[in-house]
Image: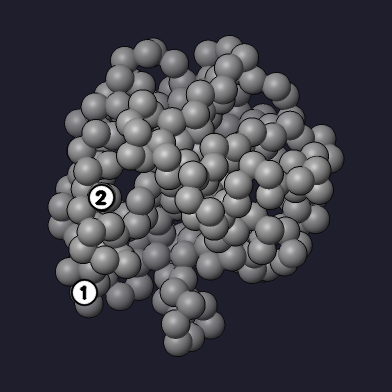
């Protein structure tokens, strides 16, 4: 059994201070993908890097206090690849890939466009160049799981207030159509939805810090594990952990029966 966990930390030091790594020690995860480190390599000291039983790799943003992704794993991968070969987005630390044998796990932090029109334009640029990258990954013939914050709620079932968010970043028609292409045209699989096709509130992974979004469970499902069909078919259990809050996102775990 392979347990993969993903979480947008909204700051690795902040999440650590809220008990994330103490909680993680009891989760029996084999691979942990994290996003939005908000830290440089020099900021990630031994206390954050050397978690019991894990090796760790990071792809940090050049800008301080911004973005960044990481992977914790119990076994050392055959290869680590940081970035997608695009200078604009590789400088933002949005992609880290680990390969073990015929399996790859990727930690992804797709840009958000909610802060400005300029960032929405950057999000669209990333989506445009990432689609052929996803096609190339599928052509490798490997089993791949892409974990992380995709910053898109795919369907109406994936957020509480879908009617009022149709013109907002994260639920724009163009974004949703792009994610449909990823799944329908390229053949990637939304692993959680395969196991829980009708789940609504329990599927949310992000809540605004405004108002009482968390208390009222006014959430969005924007964190995914999206896999190739072979490994997706091996998924046996998936869940979102909401008993403790480590960031404005919640951890999402999938168990894959690789035996």
For image coordinates 72% across by 24% down, the residue present is 75
Q: Position of residue 188 (x, y in %)?
A: 33, 32
Front-most of residues 176 and 119: 119
For image coordinates 74% across by 64% down, the residue present is 17
The furthest residue to the right: 52
Q: Which residue is mark 2?
A: 122
Quick one: label 2 or label 1, which is nearer the N terminus?
Answer: 2
Q: Is residue 96 left or right of residue 166?
A: right
Q: Position of residue 92 (x, y in %)?
A: 43, 44
Q: Position of residue 197 (x, y in %)?
A: 38, 51
For image coordinates 49% across by 55% down, the residue present is 66
Q: Is residue 161 left or right of residue 19?
A: left
Identify the secondary structure beneath mark 2: helix
For image coordinates 81% across by 48% down, the residue present is 47
Image quarter of the N terminus: top right
**Residue 173 appears anywhere in the view:** yes
Inter-mark Cα distance, 2 to 1: 25 Å
Q: Which residue is mark 1?
A: 163
């Amino acid at each position: 059994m392979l347990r993969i966990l993903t979480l947008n930390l909204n700051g690795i030091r902040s999440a650590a201070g809220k008990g994330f790594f103490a909680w993680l020690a009891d989760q029996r995860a084999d691979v942990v993908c994290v996003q939005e480190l908000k830290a440089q390599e020099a900021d990630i000291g031994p206390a954050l890097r050397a978690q019991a039983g894990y090796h760790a790799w990071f792809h940090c943003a050049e800008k301080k206090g911004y973005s960044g992704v990481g992977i914790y794993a119990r076994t050392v991968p055959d290869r680590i690849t940081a970035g997608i070969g695009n200078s604009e987005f590789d400088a933002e630390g949005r992609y880290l890939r680990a390969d073990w044998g015929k399996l790859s796990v990727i930690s992804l932090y797709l840009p958000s466009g909610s802060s400005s029109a300029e960032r929405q334009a950057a999000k669209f640029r990333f989506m445009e160049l990432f689609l052929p990258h996803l096609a190339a990954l599928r052509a490798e013939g490997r089993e791949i799981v892409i974990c992380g914050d995709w910053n898109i709620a795919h369907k109406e079932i994936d957020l509480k207030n879908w009617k009022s968010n149709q013109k907002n970043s994260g639920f724009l028609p163009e974004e949703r159509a792009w994610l449909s292409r990823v799944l329908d045209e390229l053949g990637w699989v939304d692993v959680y939805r395969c196991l829980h096709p009708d789940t609504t509130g329990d599927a949310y992974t992000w809540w605004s810090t405004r108002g009482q979004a968390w208390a009222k469970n006014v959430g969005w499902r924007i964190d995914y594990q999206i896999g190739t069909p072979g490994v997706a078919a091996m998924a046996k259990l998936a869940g979102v952990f909401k008993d403790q809050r480590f960031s404005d996102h919640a951890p999402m775990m999938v168990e894959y029966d690789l035996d």
